[in-house]
Amino acid sequence: MSAITSPRPQNKIAHPLVLVVTGLLVVLGLVAWALQLRGGMGTTSLSNLNTWGVYIAGFIFFMGLSAGSLVLAALPILFNMPRFRPYSKLATFVALISLIVAGLFILVDIGRPERLWRIARFGQLSSPMLWDLLLTVAYFIIATVFLRRLMTAKSDENLKVVAWVALIAGVADGITAFVFATQIGREFWFSAVQPIAFFTAALASAGAMLLLLLVILKAAGYSVLDSRDLNPLAGLTAATLTLGLLLLVSEIVTLSFTRSATAMALVNSMLTSPLFWIEVVTGLVAIVLLVLPVTRKSSGWVAAASLIALVHLAVKRVVFVRTGFSVPNIDYAGVALAPSAGYAPNLVEWGIMIGLTGLFLFLLALGFRALRLAPQPE
Amino acid sequence: MAGKRYVMVVDTKRCMGCHTCSLACKVENNQPDGIWWNRVLTVGGSDIDTPSGVYPEVRLEFITLACQHCENPACVKVCPVGATWKDEETGLVMQDPEACIGCRYCMVACPYTGVRQFNFDEPQYSSGFAVGSEDATKHVKSTVEKCTFCAHRLAKGQLPACIEQCPARARHFGDLNDPNSEVAQLLRERSSFRLLEEKGTEPSVYFLT
């Protein structure tokens, strides 16, 4: 039996029931997508004024999770971190499956997915969206090769090159931000801070995801790392979450200082949006829980903090996309192009979001079953 | 550049906000329900056709808003498949509904709110039959569309429908690269502005003041 497929699958985590439940979520998502394909994008709550919504936010989130996970998988190999080294395979697998989910979030956002082949045939290099698609393809190749090498390489020396490539690719997640940061028509996005903010959030999401998984692995008896061992990862997650919030403050200060009408309207639309405050509060709570000595000693609290951090980062992406559309450049009265109410995802969008998140969990459980992602303790 | 540079010049002192240009455009191009390539916007109160201020100190003006056929179009740069492009010969920004993949990035990139519109549903027509020119752009579900400066009419030597049908004669059209054209003369003689000039897109629609 080769080392690639496990003789004893990690069934406590990949219990058949987990596969059934997450599989049902995937089916729900497929039904929602079928409804959307049949009825057109009119079945979503997107409009001519709120052109992009939660699908694009989902893409940013899972792309970031993929990038951050590549970085976290590469670090222990490159910089001698023996405690975390056994989990490089897990992180790489997370990178691969979140990338698949990210790509599907783009697919469901495209009005005519049957024409996607045109990108290969008529792709325009001037488009930041093409940069993103190339990055997605690169991540897919890198994560696949990295995972394969992690399962077959005899020693870490043989992994150095691919680990460096993965690290650099992960850092390049900021390229995703150029889709938004290059747009002069969208004042909130048009900022050089976005690539940094994207990478910061990417690392935070990967840190939180790995923390959560390590706590679950420990509870299931597959990991020997206790909460003290997790401190460096908790520290990294807390630091990147903090930097993310500081960048948000910096954006609000620079926008407010101009006192231009559109900038003030933007700041106002953020400060009066409940979602923005959910982003801020969940971020602060996660940081406090990861930093306070009392809570960071407890696996339960670390897991809770990680979950809250993931919610914070998902909400952050929705706030980011929505704020880009919150203040129209030309708002004189005329025939209505969209319902006057702002954008909120409807049932079809929720169905697809839940389905794709379910797919992530399904693939993760499948990974534990088939690839034995975490080493078996002696 | 040797080609033409078609521009539209709208006289805000003559425009009376009658919306005829919007309807002329809608009919000529057989636009589906809910799609308006050319809209008349009220510069005044918060509702359409209402003035700002308190009587007798009230103000009411109009601008018309459609694709600005920019010299430096934000939409062309972002389209991942080249479904929107700048025609070298005429300077028009064109859009091919058969090539568009429906990603809506051009709508995100365009600073001019709502000039690019998406067919969220299968195009529906309350008239029950097709109207306008047979050679006008077709409308395709899940693709983006917009004003073409009536490229199909220009090809036949005609003026855009909105220009021809404006009852106040507030709209002018022509080649700005030709110094003797009506639009070039108007822009020499009258003061004008363009929308969102600070965005650097170099729009081809001028408003006389």
Image (cartoon, coloured by chain):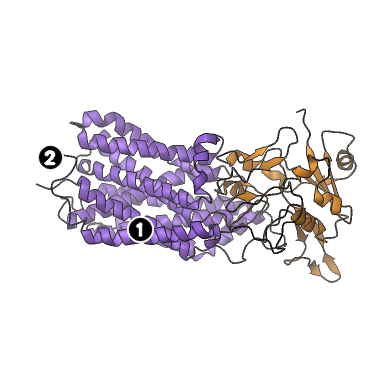
Chain that is coloured purple in the picture: A
Residue type (three-letter) at the residue carrying disc 2 = Met
Q: CA distance from mark 2 to mark 1?
A: 32 Å
Q: Residue drawn at (50%, 46%), measured in percent from left and top?
A: A114
Residue in the foreground of this view, choosing between A44 and B133 = B133
Q: Is residue B92 left or right of residue B80?
A: right
Whether A172 is drawn above or below B21: the answer is above
Tell which circle, 2 or 1, labels the residue nearer the N-terminal end.
2
- Chain of the residue under label 2: A
Label for residue A1?
2
Q: Is residue B110 left or right of residue B29?
A: left
Task: Look at chain B in the picture and name its colour.
Answer: orange
Determine which quarter of the picture holds residue A42: bottom right
The quadrant the N terminus of chain A occupies is top left
Residues at discs 2 and 1 in contact (Cβ within 8 Å): no
Residue, disc 1: A26
The kind of secondary structure element at disc 2 is loop
Whether B121 is drawn above or below A127: the answer is below
> Dot 2, how many residues are within 10 Å of its Cα: few (below 14), some (14-19), or many (20+)?
few
